[in-house]
Each structure stands twice: as structure tokens, then as C-alpha cells.
Amino acid sequence: MRELFLVIAILSLSAGVSAQTVDITWGKEAVDGHRTGVSASSASNVEEAMGYVKGRTYHAPNGKRFRGGATRDVAGLLLEAQPAMAQVKQVIGYSTRFMDRTYPECELYDWYVDEMMRATADSVGKKVDIGIVNRGGVRIEMPQGEVLYDDIMSMFPFKNNLCYVALKGKDVRVILDQMAASTFQILGGVKVVARNGKVISAEVDGEPLDDEKVYGVATLNFLLDGGDGYFIARNAVEVIHSNGWLYETMIPYVQSLTAQGKPVEFENQHWITILEEGDSK
């Protein structure tokens, strides 16, 4: 339980610096249960994974008993918190493999933008051709095995909502050129090839990006007017905001896969190709 005690200590210390700027990151660490047999629990196996407290004694999962002291006190605090945490610890899906976050593209990003495009089109009733979202909005990786409600909330923690933006191809090209010159964000629906910080080709539905054609773009409100340096709504023909936060789109999606007997899995779609000097297109 030493690691769990450390978490509580850190949270207590953090409460005293609320007026300062705090950089928060998300991550997962394995529980070291060599003394107690404790493991990370879901909503349905708290006693099995974390043990229980009776009176002044903590009964650990490995059969050891701790009468009084810091171990019993910390275990008591954590166990008392479990009912309030039950919703976020629900198992809502199953992932066939670990999906890491890698640049410029990966299975996780493509899985996310694919559903974001579908959900936006369904919400506004319009065709979506392209998806553009920021990489920084995906905070953790997809675990292998059971997927908790909290995994998806931690993956997409920010209060951003889906938006539909109608843009001419020439304005889409400006956004792609900005990415090529700096850092590519998450793209879907548009195949981009870049070299030396410049876009050398872009295709949508197998056709070259047409500067005068209007394309339906699914994105987030964060990127409409300056988020991460992007102004996707600039020169927009139309902008429609969808209701609900991003995780309120992704959690039901994972739950729907489970209801259909499907796991969470995806393949890299190769939307982004960055050529080295001398590589042919």
C-alpha cells in the first residue's frame, strides 16, 4: 500500500498550491502489491482486489492482517472512496491490443478520428469528408484487455465538443500546409504526403484536393479560433456546433461495440506520409 499512500500524500500537498499554475499529466503505473496482494480493481471486484477493513483491522487480499497503523488507515480511506468511484471503474469494453500514441499517425489516433467524423456527420446530418483534431487532446494510450469508463475519460478529459465546418479546399490546404511546416495533428479522410515541411499532395476520396470545392470537416471547438495555433473556422462557409463533450461521444461508442460483441481495435490508415529527402512519392 506504500504507493497508494504516496498518491494521497501528493494530492494533499497539491491542495496547498491551488493558486499556482500546475502542469497535470495522465498516466498509469502498476500497483506494487507485494506486501498486501493489492491489485487495481474494477467496480465489481473491490474486495477481491483491494481487501476490506473490519473494525481496526485491514484484511489484505493475500490474507495478511494489519491492525491499526498507516496501512490500515490508508486502506480504509481508499476503500471508503470506492462507491463514489464505481461509475468510472466500470468495465465498458475490451481492447485486443495496446495502442500507443506515436507521431505522425497511429492506430489510436485513426480509431478516434474515424469515430469523431462518423459522430459529427450523424449529429449534424451532413456529409463529413475530413477530420482534423489536435494530438494533445489524447492524453493516454489505449490499454490492452479491459477498458474502463475512466480509461476513456482520461483519454479525452477536456471539455471540447464536436463541430462541423464547411471549408473550401484552398482553406483546407492552408491548414495542411501549416501542419507540414510544424507538426501534423490527427487527420482522417485526407491522404497527405509531405516533404521538407511542405505538402506535395493531398487527396480526398481518391481525388486531388480541389481548391474550389466545399468539404465537410469534423473538428473540435477548441481548434476553431486559435487553439494550438489553428483557426479552422476562418473563412468557413458554415459552422455547426454539436452538443456534448468529446468523452460523451467516445464512451457510448465503446459501449456500443461491446453490445455488438466487438472489441476495440483499428488499423493504421496511413493518412499521413512524410518523405525523407530523396524518397519518391
Image (spheres, rainbow, N blue to C red):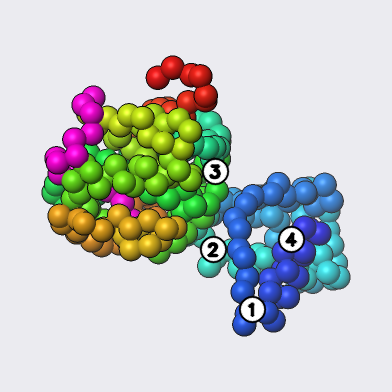
Q: Which residues are magenta?
A: 206-220
**Going 14% across and 40% down the picture, which residue do you hit?**
213
Quick one: label 4 or label 3, which is nearer the N terminus?
Answer: 4
Q: Amino acid at mark 1?
A: Gln
Say which residue label 4 marks: 4
Dot in front, 4 or 3? 3
Q: Amino acid at mark 3?
A: Glu
Which structural element holds mark 2?
A: helix
* In this view, 152 is above or below 274: below
Dot in front, 4 or 1? 1
**Going 36% across and 30% down the picture, which residue do you hit?**
200
**Going 69% across and 81% down the picture, which residue do you hit?**
16
Residues under numbered marks 2 and 3 in contact, where contact means CB atoms less than 8 Å apart: no
Q: Is the N terminus in the top left, top right, bottom left or bottom right quadrant?
A: bottom right
What separation in Å lies between label 4 and label 3 (alpha carbons)?
A: 22 Å
Q: Which mark is residue 141?
A: 3
* In this view, 209 is above or below 24: above
The spot of residue 106 in percent (x, y) is 48, 34
Quick one: label 3 or label 1, which is nearer the N terminus?
Answer: 1
Which structural element holds mark 3?
A: loop
Residues under numbered marks 4 and 3 in contact, where contact means CB atoms less than 8 Å apart: no
Q: Which mark is residue 85?
A: 2
Quick one: label 2 or label 3, which is nearer the N terminus?
Answer: 2
Quick one: label 4 or label 1, which is nearer the N terminus?
Answer: 4
Q: Amino acid at mark 2?
A: Met
Dot in front, 3 or 1? 1
Q: Which mark is residue 20?
A: 1
The spot of residue 86 in percent (x, y) is 51, 60
